């Protein structure tokens, strides 16, 4: 397991205003390519950007003799314990082996997580009661809706261990960022660097969009290979008080 770097609240606050597209580009620049959770989408309408450290739950394939409804009677059931142990401000990330043909959780458990201060949920499995889950203030990203209980296909086995979610490796403490484009996973040791580099990058892209809407060519502008565009950008920042 990689060393976990504690990420400051200031860095978390900055990342709430950074798009996953920007994060993807910056991680690529730093040599991290497999950081996007494939096959998941946000349930419900528009919500604020989800940001928080990962707290993980790993499922393995279920087997008929070990996965019956009676399992939920155990107070130590890992699915229930994950909901009760996930720290405030963290994102619960569930590894369902990219199998959305059964649910990984439903609205009752996720309501409990929201009440406890969870920052969000990411699962490459299904979600039960998907309409209700999509109405939470807490963002929920899933591979899709599914009425089947998790016991049908999934056996909850480990809490807060390294997992794969949608082909993406996730270590406890990695910073999870989710918006309308999907979910990015920032290795904890790169979170501060990404946050620092993101702000000027997004500011320049705002300038570029303004120029393109005014009729400018992207050649020499994006990327800024023409020095005159950087001069225009600096003047633009001054005019805005940036």
Image (spheres, grey):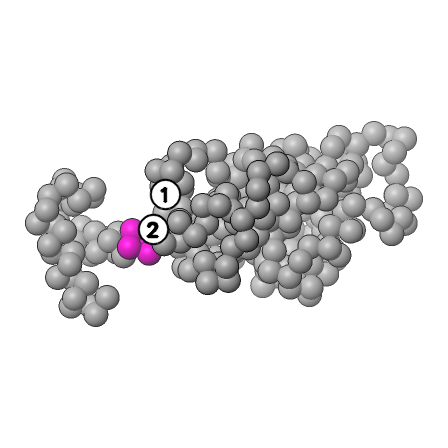
Residue drawn 10% across and 46% down?
Answer: 227
Q: Height in image: 78 above or below 119?
A: above
On the rendered structure, is 92 left or right of 46? Answer: right
From the top left corner, tell me how far across and down residue 226 is, in percent.
11, 43
Residue drawn 16% across and 66% down?
Answer: 238
Closer to the camera in the image, 138 or 229: 229
Numbered disc 2: secondary structure: helix
The N terminus lies in quadrant = top right
Residue 201 counted in the magenta span: yes
Q: CA distance from mark 1 to mark 2?
A: 8 Å
Q: Is residue 122 visible?
A: no
From the top left corner, tell me how far across and down residue 216 is, in percent.
12, 49
Near mark 2 (Cα within 10 A), the count class, few <14, some 14-19 or many ≥20, is few
In this figure, which residue is indicated by the disc labeled 1? 26
Residue drawn 40% across and 34% down?
Answer: 31
On the rendered structure, is 170 left or right of 58? Answer: left
Pointer 1 and pointer 2: residues touching (CB < 8 Å)?
Answer: yes
Residues rendered magenta in the picture: 197-202
Please tell me the numbered disc located at residue 164.
Answer: none
């Amino acid at each position: 397991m990689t060393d976990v770097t504690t990420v400051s609240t200031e860095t978390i606050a900055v990342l709430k205003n950074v798009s996953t597209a920007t994060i993807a580009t910056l991680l690529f620049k730093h040599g991290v390519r497999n950081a996007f959770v494939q096959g998941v989408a946000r349930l419900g309408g528009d919500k604020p950007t989800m940001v928080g450290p990962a707290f993980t739950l790993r499922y393995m394939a279920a087997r008929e003799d070990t996965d019956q409804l009676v399992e939920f009677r155990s107070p130590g059931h890992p699915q229930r314990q994950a909901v009760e142990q996930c720290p405030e401000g963290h994102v619960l990330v569930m590894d369902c082996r990219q199998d959305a043909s059964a649910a990984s959780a439903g609205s009752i458990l996720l309501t409990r997580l929201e009440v406890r201060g969870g920052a969000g949920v990411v699962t490459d499995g299904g979600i039960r009661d998907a309409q209700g889950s999509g109405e939470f203030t807490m963002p929920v990203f899933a591979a899709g809706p599914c009425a089947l209980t998790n016991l049908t296909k999934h056996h909850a086995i480990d809490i807060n261990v390294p997992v794969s979610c949608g082909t993406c490796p996730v270590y406890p403490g990695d910073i999870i960022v989710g918006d309308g484009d999907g979910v990015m996973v920032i290795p904890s040791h790169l979170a501060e660097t990404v946050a620092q580099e993101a702000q000027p990058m997004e500011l320049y892209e705002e300038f570029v969009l303004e120029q393109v809407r005014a009729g400018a060519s992207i050649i020499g502008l994006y990327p800024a290979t023409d020095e005159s565009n950087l001069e225009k950008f600096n003047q633009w920042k001054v005019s805005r008080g940036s």
